[in-house]
Amino acid sequence: MSQRETLAQSVVRQSLENTTRRNFLNQCVSGMSAGMGGLYLASQMAGSAQAGFQPQHAATDPLSPLSPPQPAKVKRVIYLHMVGAPSQLELFDYKPDLNALDGKECPQSFLEGKRFAFINGTPRMLGHQYQFSQHGDCGAWVSEMMPHTAECVDQLCFIKTMQTDQFNHGPAQLLCHTGATVMGSPSIGSWVTWGLGTENSDLPGFIVLLSGGRLPRVGKALWSSGFLPSVYQGVQCRSQGDPVLNVTNPPGVSRSRRRQQLDTLDTLNRESYEQYGDPETLTRIAQYEMAFRMQVAAPDVMDIRKESAETLAAYGAEPGKESFANNCLLARRLVEQDVRFVQLFDWGWDTHGSSKGESLNHGFRDKCKQTDQPVAALLKDLRQRGLLEDTLVIWGGEFGRTPMRENRGGGTMAYMGRDHSPDAFTIWMAGAGVKPGFTYGETDPVGYTATTNPVQLRDLHATLLHLLGFDYQQLTYPFKGLDQKLTGVKPTRLVKDILLDS
Amino acid sequence: MFDSIISRYPFIALIWWAAAIASTVVAAESPADAGAAAAADSSLTTAVEFATDIQPIFNEHCVACHGGVKQAADVSFIHRDAALAVIEPGAPEDSLLIDRITSDDEYEIMPPAEHGSPLAAEEVEVLTRWIAEGAQWQQPWSYEQPSAPEIPETGNDDWCRSPLDRFVLARLQREGVSPAPPAQPLQWLRRATFDLTGLPPTAAEVSAFSADLERACDDQAKQERVYAETIERLLASPQYGERWASVWLDQIRYADSKGLGLDGRRNIWKYRDWVIDAYNDDMPFDEFTIRQLAGDLLEQPTIDDLVATASNRLTQSNDEGGTDDEEFRIAAVLDRVSTVWQTWQGITIGCVQCHSHPYDPISHEEFYQSVAFFNNTADSDLGEEYPILRVPLESKNNDAAVNLDREIRSLEESIWRRERDVVSDKNAHWRPITELRAEADKQTDIDVEIRDGTTEFFTTDTLSNGTTITLTGEIPAGVEELTAIRLTLAPRNLETAKADSEWGFVLSQIKASLLVPGEDVVHVLLDRVIGDEAHPFKDPDQSLNEKSRDGFAAYTRIHYPRTAVLVLDKPLAINRASNLDEPVELKIELKHSVNALGAFALVSRRGSLAVSDVADLQAQLGGEALVDQRERLAKAESQRKEIASTKVPIMRERPEHLSRPTHVFIRGLFLTKADRVEPGVPASMPPLVSAGGENADASAGSPPTRLTLAKWIASDNNPFTARVAVNRVWARLFGIGIVATEEDFGSSGERPSHPQLLDHLATRFQGEQSWSQKELLRSIVLSSTYRQDAASRPGLKARDPENRLLARGPRFRLPAEMVRDAALAASGLLTEKLHGPPVQPPIPAGIWKPFAGDPWKTPGTDDPDRYRRSIYTYTKRSIPYPMFAAFDAPSREFCTPRRLRSNTPLQALTTLNDTTFVECAEALASRMLNEHDEVGDQLRFGWITVATRDPNTAELAALKSLYQTCLDDGDPPDDAMQAVAAVLLNLDEIMSK
């Protein structure tokens, strides 16, 4: 048996390699780039007959910054979600007729074919609980509950006709942030960081901040990466304790000791690369270095004591507390550091009237007080620093509230409250790419449903992706046999009328 | 101590390697062998193949408009019949398809310009040739039954230990690539130990293996025996079950919480333990399948058979206030369908909820035929998770428990049937109450009218919590004695409620009295309530118990009229003598204290009354046989309560008379229903087979059940099951499946890299291996393919980065569970205890903020439960365990066929700073210090423990230098060693297998 290749054999083998190479490439739809890049590309291409935009991140960094496929107005997003669904009828959607109907039985036409979470039989109409007045050059109506926000209306672009098809919190919050009603799909921030990466590799690209004392009920599913790689999941940061999980060295390990450890690890992992030639090893080495930088960058950016007393006062922020005010200030600090997507959740807006805290006449006042000033301060601060030029701020909840008073269990509630209402709610946006001092869409005379220009959550998602430079139909990821999109499969439209360049 | 082996063994192994290289070349030169190789690869044949040549063209250019979803101009390229509208087999010139794709007319050309560029010349050519050859249509490759492929000749029997190696080598020969040299023995040991047990080999196992190899000297057969014995040891270890269960739990979306709503705890860990045991017992995969899908429908199911069905109860449920139980029941049913197709068949079917499959031959209606198999289970998104099974905490009590359960169910059934017979129309001569008044308190409105000849009460509008309905009716003339009262409660709309159920009722309390004119009200004593099902969730007799809110119920939904019979404790004479003009009236008070989800008052919506005057009803119901059975039932129940048990949600069918019809949902929405469907499987697949072996279409005999479906999936005739199963195992071992898209074996998924290897493995798995996963694993991990060195080779790295050609051994990052378990094992902290309720190891502060309740209780450092294997960690869907989330473990909302592997700074922070890993580093450091006296030996020991090999000089030097630096900085040896141990636990090599 010959142990060495003859020249003739070598030629035959070479030619075989050449002729079958194309076959091989055709059959193995595997990525040509090495390592992570290869893996992602392979999984993206598999089964994708009409592949859309495919982010091509650097092989060693799945968060490497990318340009969007289209010109983009928005580079960063701050999304303020009022968990529980704030009442549009006590904040922005002024309906004089509703006051006239206060206490009257709800017409049957409002109830036919509708499903409610708690309303039962025939409820009574409920007028506005607070006074409204007009503000700014645009003359937008804002209730007395939001005096600071009212001063900013000329920067705000209201959509009064948001609609959803879910009337329970969990599924509605999921629909709002992941485009699906059950857990397991990627959140907006995950899609965006997958598509664009992040400009600051010392910090996570998608950061989540919580206030109000409770996690939203579906928890981390709201900032999950779903079927996208887990590197794109939102990273929850805190103003108390470790700002990022495990960012602090264990007791007794100084920064210099950690450096020495990482140097040793680097030497050893390079040996490992020498031996196995696995590109993942190089990626891992890079990740440890990034982690080392993050250990400084994350606590630094999360430390609001570095802000002036005036700034703290403007936001109503108090270092060391977990509050919405602190989180608004942190949001500014994070976008200033080029964090791609900052998601705030503030819990406590579910005003059914079933308890003092969950009522329009008590708990709701507190929520408004806690959030109104920080939101206005955030907008002013961003504008002063020029960040509103390329940052978009979104404010909203997961659905609206009924113009009827809730009558849970067929009785009269102890406090004033409204049930969940999916057919009309108000959100606003401010900043890059959207018309300031503008209102889009109109609801019926009692603010129950959209009469002109309804906007589905998926339309909002499409518009948001557009502002970030994506065609919502092209940003797809193959999963379960479908090219999955944030906007789902139902007909979707871009809300062009709210865009500045339209 | 290992050096000698490591240096010697490659020499031995090189014999195979050299032989392999030599014969690769020989094969390329030999016409006979080349022919054999070509035959093994269908892509080299010249006839046009539909699946490889044609379907991809349709998928790329046509099906977006002419597919399963859109069928523009009624043309679809999913089924041949529909495509024949534009194809004339044998005559391309008469085929409209060819005209249109080659047209010069901008309005004619297909695809239209705005939908894509015209087909390439080669594509047109191949389509033309295919039509000329008769336009033969094939199902997607995976729909064709696999047949055992001929095992290729490679001319290199030395390299090929296993038949599967021949398929791999034949392919490598065609590609002109030689296999890698064999892995160092310890590299293989590490790989196989992780793959089979999820843990690294211990230092003792490493020594024993090395010593055995040394004893085997150069004797190849003895060496092989050492390898084989090692595999037997690993397969027999209980850790095997834990490792492979964790793979299955991703498929079946196992979690310890409910998902939506409060995401509260779901007590279902007994199912997880069942899976572990099933793997350890090497339960054949066909049985494993049947038990999980339909264990409850087996004859005389055991406790284990029933626990297995909990696989279907792992769906998300929603107990948020104000949610519709029916909506989330349906969501769970659809997820079961989707998971079954995904997990067992590799078919993505979720999209077919709304429309026909865009690529694969599965129609919209066929999806709902699948739904029909699952639509009649008794569960309905209830907070109590009914139906539940009391599973003994100690499995030794399973037999006693199941015997009692069988006795209880059989007695319940028998008692109920006897009682129903006594109170049947025929026997009890029910006399309807035609003169009826109804009142309701709170805000509930109520009225009475005659509908279809029956006098009925009905509620309208608002239903208040705690409503009491009071019905007053005339005792019909001629009734001289009252023995029983029959209450019929119905949905508001009898027709629509069958498919679109309404909120049901709970009769928390029933009171009856007799109003005789001029006399005091007579309180009617009721003895029992006989409901209309043998095993209700709620005991009807509780309606008579003032202290209970439960009772006769349609809980929480009502589909059909429901009846309860209230039996008087003794016959009550109706005394009309005093005043014949005024009637005697019966007054019934129905109190409803239960509401669903804080929102929906479970109040009777509509109903009627009847009475019986059959004098010996009480005597019949108190007959000896019934009394005896009731006593036996009570005794069996009290014995059963003695067996300490935990309640696990399982599958059970609803009784037939309450079964839910299944309809197609228009555009996938459950509120809009179209035609009714019966259970069935898609026509593109083999037909269902009934127990007698005949095709079981709906018309023949009894309709197919979940058990029929389970057996169909687990049958040798199912083209998907074995392929998907072996591919999953292959992917876990090699990092990527033979079909890379493990979740999609349909026409839009990736085609197998080695089709014949896949079919070889699948047919062998079904046949020779009798569905034994241990057999399958044994054949793979002892193969030469698996035993190759993992180092990538310069030429191949760029050409085949993912090792699809299998020209080297697998190397990739360990899954989350193994990363953590390996650290625990290496540090000596790992608790090797099987089974039990979920545990709560250390979690970073601030993470655990559940929406409600559910505290996280971390056991102290002296408690073994702090260091259990990862599979036992409490899995809450809304708050995934951070370490797992960082390392790509899914949060188990639904079936995850494969995990993506990422590489992030958060992973680095976890393994450097997370409490568990810090404790591991500390423990590993003290092990190192205790095991040896010399620093060099200590470091070497640490290295071997984590990496399963000796360090080389440079590696040892790097460790020494760090240790010395720490000492120089004034650290005590403990701390210095801990700094080193932390580095060891973060090595690239410990993260990889």
Image (cartoon, helix red, strand yellow):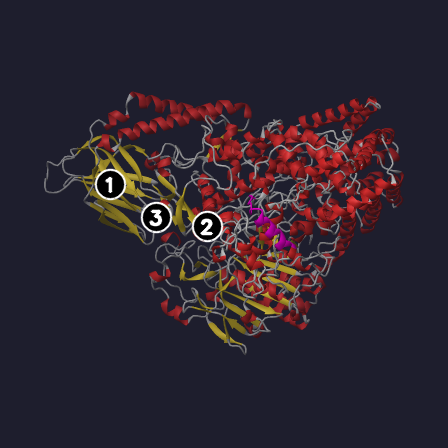
The answer for how far apart the CA atoms under marks 1 and 2 are is: 34 Å
Per the rendering, the mark at residue B421 is none
Q: Nearer the viewer, residue B213 or A435?
A: B213
The Cα atoms of the two marked residues, 2 and 3, are separated by: 25 Å
Residue A287 image offset from top left, x and y in percent: 76, 51
Numbered circle sitting on residue B321: 2
Q: Is residue A443 left or right of residue B719?
A: left
Kind of element beneath mark 3: helix
Element type at mark 1? strand
Query: Residue B732 is drawn in which quadrant?
Result: top right
Please state which amino acid type lies under the numbered disc 2.
Gly
Question: From this viewpoint, is residue B829 visible?
Answer: no
The answer to which of B257 and B694 lies nearer the viewer is B694
> Magenta region: which residues?
B122-139
Could you tell me if the residues under marks 1 and 2 are in contact, i.e. CB atoms within 8 Å?
no
Where's residue B174, x and y in %?
A: 74, 40
